[in-house]
Every structure is written in C-alpha cells, then in structure tokens.
Image (tube, grey):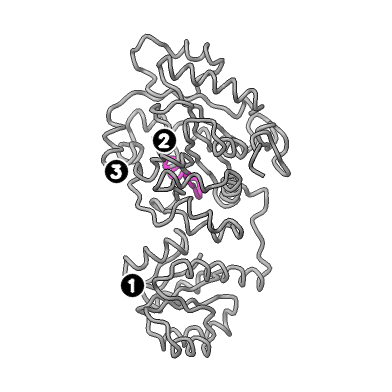
Amino acid sequence: MPIVVENSRANADLFTSVTGPESLVVGSLEELKRSLSESPNEYAIVLGPAVDLEASAALADTLRVTRPSISVILIRRRVDTSVLAEALRSGMREVVDERDLTGLGSAVTRAQQVWQALNGGAAPAEGSRGRQVTVFSPKGGVGKTTLAVNLAVALSENGAKRVVLVDLDLAFGDVAITLQLFPARTIADTVHLESGLDFTVLEPLLTDYRGQLSALVAPVQPDAKDNIPPSLVGRILNLLKSHFDFVVVDTSPSFDEYALQAFDETDEMLLVTTLDVPTLKNVKVAVETLDLLNFPKPRRRLVLNRADDKVGLTPDKVESTLGMTISTPIPTSSQVAHATNSGEPIISAQPRHPVSQAINKLARSIAATGATPEGIPAAGAHGRPSTPKRSLLRRNGR
C-alpha cells in the first residue's frame, strides 16, 4: 500500500481517495522512516506539497540505493523547472501537481508496475479468491439495500479480512446515502479506465468505510448508467473477488444486464421477499427465471424481511409458494429506518437489536459456508467451472 506523507487531514483524504483506502498516512518524514522499516514490500511513497523539497530529495537519493523498487512521488503546488531538476537529480520517479488527482493515480499505478517488474510480483492466485454475495429482489421497497449494507458491515466486523460493497443499482443506488458516504469517485469513473483496468486502477475508486469495509458506489447522475457497458461490470466484480474476502453486491430490482453480470459471478444469492402478495408474485417469477437461467438452487437463500408483520400472509405460505425454505427471517422494526436516517446502519447503532442479531446470524452462516456450498464446484450461472466461463447470462457482454 502507498504511504502518504501529509500533515493536513483534508489533503490526506483527497490524496488517499486516489491512492486507495488502504494507504497509510503519516505526518512527517520521521514517521515515514519508522513505517518503512516495517514495510518490506512497499512500492510507493507520496510526499505532500508541504514536505520540504530538500528533505524530499535527500530521502529519494537514499532510497534509490537502499530500496530501489520504491517509487518516490512528489506533489507540488507549483511544478517548475527547478523542482523537476531537483527531482531528476535525486531519483524521484514522478512529480505531480497537487490538483492533478488523475496524474497521481496514474503515478501510483506505474509505481506498482515498477515494483512488480523488479520483484517478480504476480497477481493473487486463483485459490485466494473471495466470495461474492448478491442481494436481489425483483420488487423495490423490500429492504434489499438495507440488508446489503448491514450484511457488509456485519461481515467486515465478524472476522473477514476485507469486504467491499458494490452498488449495482446504477440509476438509483442508495448505498452511499445509506452509509452517509461522500465519495470522490463512483463506478462511472471506470469507463474512462476500461482499457487498462486492473486492481491498481480500480482500488482508488473505492470509498473507505471504517477500515475493513470499502464501497464502490453508484453514479450520482442516473443517465451515467448508459455509458457503462455490462461487460465492464463483470470485469470489475472479477477483479474485486481476487482482492477481497467478500464482495457484497446490491442490485437493481430487475433482471437487467448488470444484474445478470453479477449473477454470473455470484457464489451466494440472497433473494429478499416480504409478506405481501405483489412481492411474493414477483419473487415467484424471479425464482422461475433463475431456474431457466440454470442458476444453482443450492446457491440461493431466501430472506424474509419484516417476517412478523400481521398481514394475513404467513411464512409457511411464502415457503410453499416459492418452493424454498426461509433461510433468515428478519423482524419488523421502526428502529431500522431511524438508524438509517441518522446515518448509521442498525447493526452498528444497535448491535443487540433483534434485526441486528438476525443479520449477524446470517453473516456468520455465510462466512462459515465454504466457497463451494453443498459440494457444487465453483461455477457461473450454468453450473460450469468458472474459468474459463461464458454463460447465458453474458448474452451481449462480449
């Protein structure tokens, strides 16, 4: 992970929005030296505009001999010939204007490429891939996003190393507002980077939420969806599975091309329903559609939200209608909406609440399930091995 030397919190947040949420921020060169002694695989050091130029040059001059695979990236408020000459003499690899965040991201990407070239670095092995949990319902208003957000938080707090939450409701996604995030980048920014998309390019687009959880949020403008090719979504999810323990995906309430791409990468699907006839009808159609798409039944879990509503429809009737056993019943509570409106998911705001306990139980069950549930080999929606794979779900994505 890059180390950013910057004593201004606002600047540090701006730079790490590009260098990635896992970047380490230190306030001085002395702190940097201590951190470097504990980071044998560091590949990039970003020196903020307040760091003295002479001290920066001395550091770069030392590192090019003692740690030649580390790239020193200098950020300046004004880049002129004297700055460039000093950077060249000392062995700095990049000089970036502080307003050029795109240039900073590109510099960090090149730094990792240099490190890999000098150290023989390779992408994570296939066996280390994480698991994707897709939360889906064909009906809006059933609590799908609330479940996805709280589940992602629960997984990140229940021992998972890293969790990323992806908002694939590209026109009207609510993940950012539910978590009270103010992202500098969204999934729409991947379009301009598609040709060279790898994790070093994708990671800076993630927004950090309390350490172990990151989010790739939906575009701010609904029409931005039209510029995002479905095939790109598949590539993004595949990349994220290679670098996170869990990828939690919140889909739109429809079988659009983006949802189909997500299904093809899905290891476990949470199908959300409630106790009302219109929702039950739509979920029934969804189950039949999943059957037609050959999405494996053992990879599906039925989640009944607001399970204790007294509306004349019982959980038994839901199970008999859908031909599925309810995996997780989640009780009704106005506290869920209160927590969301206050900017904190119920699972964090009230961890002992019955809703939080139900979601935590679901998270523990998912975490305890192997990457290939019930003996089914890793596969796409057709049940065939996932590499290589080309399924019905990717009709127009290639």
- Residue 207 screen position, x and y as percent: 42, 53
Nearer to me, 289 or 397: 397
Q: Which type of secondary structure does the marked residue at label 1 adopt?
A: loop
Marks 3 and 1 in Cβ contact (< 8 Å): no
Callout 3 environment at 10 Å: few (<14), some (14 to 19), or many (20+)? some
Specify the amino acid type for callout 3.
Gly
Q: How many marks?
A: 3
- Residue 267 screen position, x and y as percent: 60, 36
Callout 2 environment at 10 Å: few (<14), some (14 to 19), or many (20+)? many
Placement of 217 over or under 4, stated as above or below: above
Q: Which of the 4 image quadrants contains residue 41?
A: bottom right
Specify the amino acid type for callout 2.
Thr
Marks 3 and 2 in Cβ contact (< 8 Å): no
Q: Which mark is residue 145?
A: 2
Marks 3 and 2, how far apart at CA:
14 Å
Q: Residue at x 48, y 16 (%)?
A: 281
**114 with respect to 167 (left or right):** right
| Mark 1 or mark 2, earlier in chain | 1
Q: Quadrant of the C terminus?
A: top right
Nearer to me, 90 or 256: 256
| Mark 3 or mark 2, earlier in chain | 2
Residue marked by disc 1? 7
Specify the segment rendered in magenta: 153-166
Residue marked by disc 3? 343
Magenta run includes residue 54: no
Q: Which of the 4 image quadrants contains residue 116?
A: bottom right
Placement of 205 over or under 252, stated as above or below: below
Q: Which type of secondary structure does the marked residue at label 3 adopt?
A: loop
